[in-house]
Amino acid sequence: MITHLNLLPGVIASIFKGAFNLSAIFGGFAGSAIMQGIKRGLFSNEAGVGSAPNASASAGVSHPAKQGLVQMLSVYIDTIVICSATGFMLLCSGVAPEGGIAGMPYVQEAVAGSLGSFGSVFITVALFMFAFTTLIGNFYYAEMGLRYICDKAPGKALLNTFRVAAALIVCLGATMDFSVVWDTADVLMGLMALINLPVIVILSKPAIHCMQDYFRQKVQGKNPVFRAKDIGLKTKTDFWND
């Protein structure tokens, strides 16, 4: 900088020119929107995070590709259909979003603007149902993971400790600041994705073979039935061996 001091005014002018032109402003806005969309999308459908397969794996189907296709459809319905409908509903309500009514209070205000007091009651009850069923589902995921780690037979003391800890975490989350909860969830979801995405790549080969086996049987007019040996799986699986 000292040896090129004569260039410094032009450098400063270039920084301000590049930071405050229309292209930079639009680029920053678009990047922020995409980042926010990715974070909320992960929280909505959990695609790539590795939690939803816990529920899918418990489904009773003749071929795993059947449940895989259902799971793919659920991502579309959840994120594209439901979230878009919610967004359109809020933006068409005439209630302007403000920092003081961010999140669920904004939804309540927007619905109440069209449906009156019934809208607030309906949203409150619906939110309770959504939250309660989500807690049950996530608790199921966590307990099944614990059972797997402990070779399907965790000790009673460990299981009770886990359940008490889970209840305390729920109580803590319910009383935390709204922004802190979202930021914490974003970080944890990101960590889960970082762990799960490499595993998806590792498992991609047998998954593709499974899909090909499914469509091959569909073309033949059969109700697809999966057997591990049909796709060359050498290791014994918990299911699909007959």
Image (cartoon, rainbow, N blue to C red):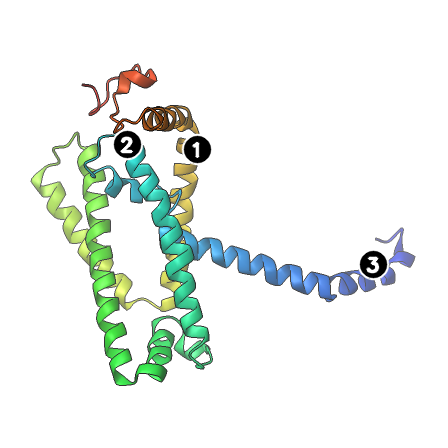
Q: CA distance from mark 1 to mark 3?
A: 42 Å
Q: Residues within 10 Å of mark 3 (few under 14, many from 20)?
A: few
Residue that label 3 marks: 11
Q: Amino acid at mark 3?
A: Val
Q: Amino acid at mark 2?
A: Pro
Where is residue 166? Give x, y as percent.
20, 53
* In the depicted structure, whether residue 177 falls above or below residue 35: below
One can see residue 144 in this view: yes
Residue that label 2 marks: 64
Nearest to the observer: residue 214 or residue 16 = 214
**Residue 160 circle label:** none
Sequence-first disc among 1 and 3: 3
* In the depicted structure, whether residue 21 falls above or below residue 163: below
Residue that label 1 marks: 198
Which mark lies nearer to you, 2 or 1? Answer: 2
Secondary structure found at label 1: helix
Q: Are marks 1 and 3 in contact (CB under 8 Å)?
A: no
